[in-house]
C-alpha cells in the first residue's frame, strides 16, 4: 500500500468501473504519475472510474504531476484546480460541466472537454475561459460566488456575494439540474456543486424570485420564451 501511494497518487484505480462521487482529493503527492488520481485501465473506458461532483486540488507528482491521469470514464461536474502539472492528462470519453483552473497546465492534447470552464481556453462546445469566481480558493472553498445566493458551509446557510460566477447556468443544457436550489436557471452549473443542493443560485439582475410560479422554469419571476425553450430541450427525456 505504501509503495502504491508513493508511485501513484491519492487514489490508484485498477478495478472495473468504480464510481467516485462527492469526494475531495487534495494535497496528495506521487513519485510517478497522477498525483490526485491514477487510473490503469489500458485505455478501456468500460474499466475506468467515473467521477462526479468531486474536487481534485493541490496534487503533485514527480513525473507527470497531474490532478487526474489516465481516466477514460465519465468526468462530470468536477472542479480540478491548482494541481502541479496537467489538471487532466490522458483522460477522455466524456469530460463535461467541469471547472479546470489554476493548474500548471489544464488539459493534455488527448483530453477533450465540453461545457467546461478552462483557464487556457481549450476549444470545445460550450467551453468558457472566464474566472470562475470561487468563494475562497485559498482555504479550499470552491463554491461559486452569486449575487442571488451561495452556500456557505461555515454558517450552514446562504450568503450573498457582490459578483456572480460565469459558471452558473452554463453547463450542458441536456444535463439534469438535479437538486440545485430555486432559482436555478433551468441549466446545471459547472463545477463540483453543480446539480447538488449546494449549487449556487441564478442571478437575474434583481432581487431573487421568492415565489415558484407554474411555468417559470428558470426562476426569473417571468414566464416567457426562455421557459418554453428549456421545457422543449428536456421534453420527454425520461421516456
Image (cartoon, rainbow, N blue to C red):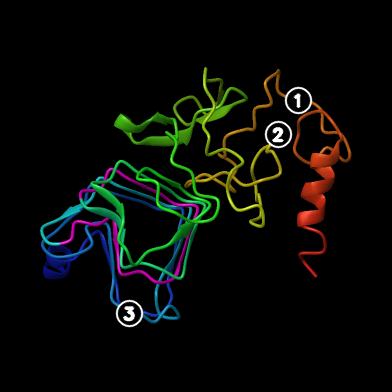
Would residue 233 be found to the left or right of residue 132 on screen? Answer: right
Residue that label 3 marks: 41
* Mark 1 in CB contact with mark 2 (< 8 angstroms): yes
Highlighted range, magenta: 64-84
Q: Which residue is mark 1?
A: 209
For marks 1 and 2, the one nearer the N-term is 2
Q: Secondary structure at mark 3?
A: loop
How crowded pointer 2 is (Cα within 10 Å; few <14, some 14-19, many 20+) is rated as many
Overall secondary structure of the magenta section = loop
Say which quarter of the image contains residue 47.
Answer: bottom left
Residue sitting at x 42%, y 52%: 54
Question: Is 142 within the magenta?
Answer: no
Q: CA distance from mark 3 to mark 2?
A: 41 Å
Is residue 88 shown left or right of residue 84?
A: right
- The local secondary structure at tag 2 comes to loop
41 or 155: nearer the viewer: 41
Q: Position of residue 168 (x, y in %)?
A: 57, 38
Spatial distance from mark 1 to mark 2, Cα to Cα? 7 Å
Amino acid at each position: 500500500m505504501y509503495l502504491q501511494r508513493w508511485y501513484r497518487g491519492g487514489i490508484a484505480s485498477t478495478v472495473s468501473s468504480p464510481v467516485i462521487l462527492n469526494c475531495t482529493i487534495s494535497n496528495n503527492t506521487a513519485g510517478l504519475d497522477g498525483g490526485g488520481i491514477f487510473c490503469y485501465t489500458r485505455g478501456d473506458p468500460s474499466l475506468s472510474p467515473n467521477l462526479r461532483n468531486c474536487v481534485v486540488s493541490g496534487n503533485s507528482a514527480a513525473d507527470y504531476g497531474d490532478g487526474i491521469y489516465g481516466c477514460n470514464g465519465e468526468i462530470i461536474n468536477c472542479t480540478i484546480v491548482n494541481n502541479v502539472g496537467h489538471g487532466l492528462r490522458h483522460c477522455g470519453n466524456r469530460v463535461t460541466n467541469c471547472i479546470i483552473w489554476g493548474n500548471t497546465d489544464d488539459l493534455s492534447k488527448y483530453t477533450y472537454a465540453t461545457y467546461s470552464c478552462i483557464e487556457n481556453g481549450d476549444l470545445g462546445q460550450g467551453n468558457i475561459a472566464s474566472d470562475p469566481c470561487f468563494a475562497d480558493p485559498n482555504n479550499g472553498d470552491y463554491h461559486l460566488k452569486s449575487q442571488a445566493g451561495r452556500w456557505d458551509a461555515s454558517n450552514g446557510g446562504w450568503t450573498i456575494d457582490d459578483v456572480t460566477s460565469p459558471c452558473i447556468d452554463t453547463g450542458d443544457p441536456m444535463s439534469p439540474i438535479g437538486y440545485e436550489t430555486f432559482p436555478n436557471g433551468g441549466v446545471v452549473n459547472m463545477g463540483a456543486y453543480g446539480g447538488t443542493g449546494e449549487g449556487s443560485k441564478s442571478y437575474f439582475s434583481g432581487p431573487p424570485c421568492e415565489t415558484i410560479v407554474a411555468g417559470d422554469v428558470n426562476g426569473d419571476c417571468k414566464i416567457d420564451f426562455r421557459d418554453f425553450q428549456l421545457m422543449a430541450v428536456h421534453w420527454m427525456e425520461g421516456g
